[in-house]
Each structure stands twice: as C-alpha cells, then as structure tokens.
Image (cartoon, rainbow, N blue to C red):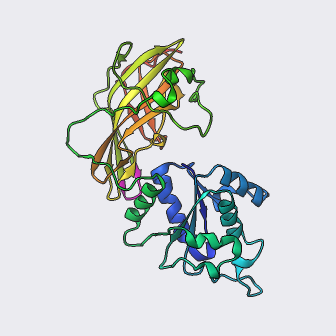
Amino acid sequence: MRIFLSYRRGDVGGYAGRLADALHARMGPRSVFQDVLDIAPGQDYTAVIDRALDDSDALLAVIGPGWLTASTPQGSPRLFAADDYVRLEIARALDRDVRVVPVLVGGATLPAGADLPEALQRLAQRQAVVLHDETWHQDVDGLMRSLRGKASSPTQRRRGGPVALAVAAPLAALGAGAWWLWGPTDEGGSGQEAGAEIASCPPLTGDGWTAIQLSADPIGGEEVEGGELIFSVEAASWRPQGSAWQVTLATTMEAALPSGAYHGDWRYDSLVVAQRPFAVTCFSPSPEFVDAETVGDALIGFDVACEPVGYIQLRLENDADRIDVTPPTLEPGEC
C-alpha cells in the first residue's frame, strides 16, 4: 500500500512528520509520499504530484486547526487560490478516484462543504479519522486497519505460546504454477518488478523440500518507535527451481511495544547466500497485524541463484540487524 500525505506545513508540520514516522514503522520506508522528502529541488511540482497520486492507494488529508483559515500574503483564503498546493493535491485525488481520508489532528474538526472551494466540497462527505495525542499509536493502528479493510485485529497467541507455522494463502487465484513463473533472480533482485505485490508462499509440505540446519540462536531484534520487534527463524527449507533454488523460512515476530506492529515483507531486507543478497519473492503473515506483546508467524521466501549451503544470513529491514540462519562457524557456499 502506498500513502500520499497532504498537509499544510504551517498548520500541522509536526503532526505530519509524526504520522509519516508512524506509517514508515508500520508499512516500510517506501510506503509514504511526503512532499518535503520526495520532491527534489528543481523538479516540476505538479508533475511529481501527478505521478505520486497515480502510484497511491489513498491520500490522507491531514487537517489541523489552521487548515481552513490559512491566508495568502494579501489576506485571502489560501484554499481558494488556484495555485494552492493543498487544494491541488486533494482536488486531483478526488478527480482521480483515489481514496481520500480526512485526518483530524490538534483538535480540528472537518470543515463544512459550504466553507470549501467547489473542487474540494466532496471532502466534507468523507468519513474523517481523528488522531488524539494521548492515544496516538492506537488511533494510527485503527487508521491502518481501516485502510486495509479490517474492522479489528485477528486473534493472536501471547508470548510463550506454542509456535505454529503460518498457513499459506490459497494459490488458486495465482494459478497452480505461479511460484514457478517468477523465474530466477539476479544478485539483490527479487524476480519481480519494482512495486509488484508480493505473492503468498507455498507451505513447507510435500515432496522436494530439504530442511536447512539452523544455528543455535537464530534470533534478531529491531528497535522501533516505542519498543522493539524480535524476530526468530523457526525452520528453513529449500527445493530446486530449474538451475536455481527456492528457500523458504518459517519466522516469528514478537511485538514488544505497546502499540503492536504490522508484520510485512518490508521487515525483511534480504537473504544472503554465498555472500550474495537475494530479495523477498513471497510472504505469508499470520496475522498481518501483531498486537502488543503477542507473536505473529510468517513464511518468507526467496529465489536464489546460489546453492543454499554453508553460512546463510537473514538481513532485517535495518541492514545492521541480521540473523544467523545457519551456524556462523560455517564457511559461505560458492556461487
């Protein structure tokens, strides 16, 4: 999912930055378009906005107490100026049928349609989300569940409960041979186009799988806002794919933080085999959102061009955080 943040810096600059950080922590660093970060000096603003909206699933219109009353140097309402960037962003999203969600912060209320320029009056008919300072993380999590079409979090197991491998989503919609159609990957590649949705992993059952001996402590952690995410590799297997190999790991993620966290494929950077990194090609979380102090499971797969023997390492989202999948005393394989 790709989110476009629309806001007026003089109104909610601090809130917008905080919201962007929270979305990055839950969805990954490339999931949010924010003009202050994503428009380089000298670029055509309207062209960049158009491209970003084409790539976005939703626009969050962050509205603070001064959003409606902001004025130009001449004293006229900025929203009614034809070149006002906030007006342009929201109007273009509404015209393109991009999902537009008003996000109210700092005690702001949703403006009435009569107070808005004609191009934005449809905004007043959209269901708004309120983010409170005292319940910020819970409110952002509720926003995320709404955007993903989920009314509530799935049932999860508490820490210390038995480990259960994730059940892969049915592959029928992808075709029986979908896994085999991705093809081998180049170094650091995934076999998929950039921005393509990650497919579900097939379960580690049936013929053809060979188990990988794990290291004594295949565990790693990642510091996030409000706490820590703790990852563990519970099992790993490979099977041949033509002249390459499929490697699938059964992992867990513990959300050791008060707000919980999404368990997404972006949490895993790459699998290093024979000293070469290979990106994620399939991912099956169970559940997608891991509540505070609970553990979620996942299958995560890689198409690798090197025989999966010797020392293998799993790199997490922050490249400095890594897990020894196999014993670190092993020599890397050759490729």
Residue at the image position 57 percent from the left and 51 percent from the top: 2
Q: How many marks?
A: 0
**Residue 8 appearing in the image:** no
Would you place residue 131 above or below residue 49 in this image? below
Q: Which residue, as the protein is rendered here, is positioned at the far bottom?
A: 75
Q: Position of residue 52 (x, y in %)?
A: 67, 53
Would you place residue 176 above or below residue 41 in this image? above
287 or 246, nearer to the observer? 287
Per the picture, the main secondary structure of the magenta-coloured stretch is: strand
* 81 relative position to 300: left or right: right
Residue at the image position 77 percent from the left and 86 percent from the top: 74
In magenta stretch: residue 20: no
Residue at the image position 37 percent from the left and 72 percent from the top: 134
Residue 69: name its quadrant: bottom right
Q: Position of residue 99 (x, y in %)?
A: 58, 58
Q: Position of residue 186 (x, y in %)?
A: 60, 24
* 142 relative position to 79: left or right: left
Q: Position of residue 125 (x, y in %)?
A: 56, 70
Q: Which residues are magenta?
A: 223-227
221 or 54, nearer to the observer? 54
**Residue 197 appearing in the image:** yes
Would you place residue 327 above or below residue 77 in this image? above
Q: Quadrant of the C terminus?
A: top right
